[in-house]
Image (cartoon, grey):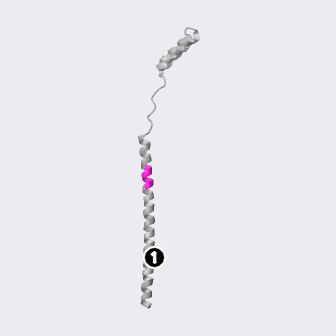
Amino acid sequence: MGIMRRRMRRRAVVGVAAAGVAYHQGKKHQRRAQEDEQYQDEQYQDEQATEYAPAPPEDVGPDAADLEQIEKLARLHESGALTDEEFSSAKAKLLA
């Protein structure tokens, strides 16, 4: 009967050891899967950011020549040579 008990103990120890190894392998696999998923999410977000980035704004503001013309119109308006309506329509043409 002593031999039987030894065999049973060995089987129990081997079975527990195998279960422990399987547990750690499963945890390792789970951790790698999470890391892969995180990496893929980051890559997807990077792709989204580069694909749908807004276009740079166009240069909409008036240039130096337009500003000089507006200043000239303002002086004419202040002197009384242009009415309010004439000044606003001329300024709108320059800015358009």
**Quadrant of the rendered structure where residue 19 is?**
bottom left
Is 49 on the left or on the right of 77, as rendered?
left
Residue range highlighted in magenta? 37-42
Secondary structure beneath dot 1 equals helix
Q: Is residue 68 something one can see in this rendering?
A: no
Q: Is residue 57 something one can see in this rendering?
A: yes
34 relative to 61, above or below: below
Q: Position of residue 1 (x, y in %)?
A: 44, 91
Residue 39 among magenta residues: yes
**Quadrant of the rendered structure where residue 12 is?**
bottom left
The kind of secondary structure the magenta stretch mainly shows is helix
In this view, the residue in front, 75 or 96, is 96
Q: Which residue is mark 1?
A: 16
Q: Position of residue 66 (x, y in %)?
A: 48, 19
Please report the residue visible at 56 percent of the width from the left and 10 percent of the height from the top: 83
Q: Amino acid at mark 1?
A: Val
60 relative to 46, above or below: above
Q: Residues within 10 Å of mark 1 (few under 14, many from 20)?
A: few
**Quadrant of the rendered structure where residue 56 is?**
top left
Count the numbered circles shown: 1
35 relative to 65, above or below: below
Please report the residue visible at 43 percent of the width from the left and 82 percent of the height from the top: 10
Please report the residue visible at 44 percent of the width from the left and 50 percent of the height from the top: 42
Q: Position of residue 11 (x, y in %)?
A: 42, 81
29 relative to 90, above or below: below
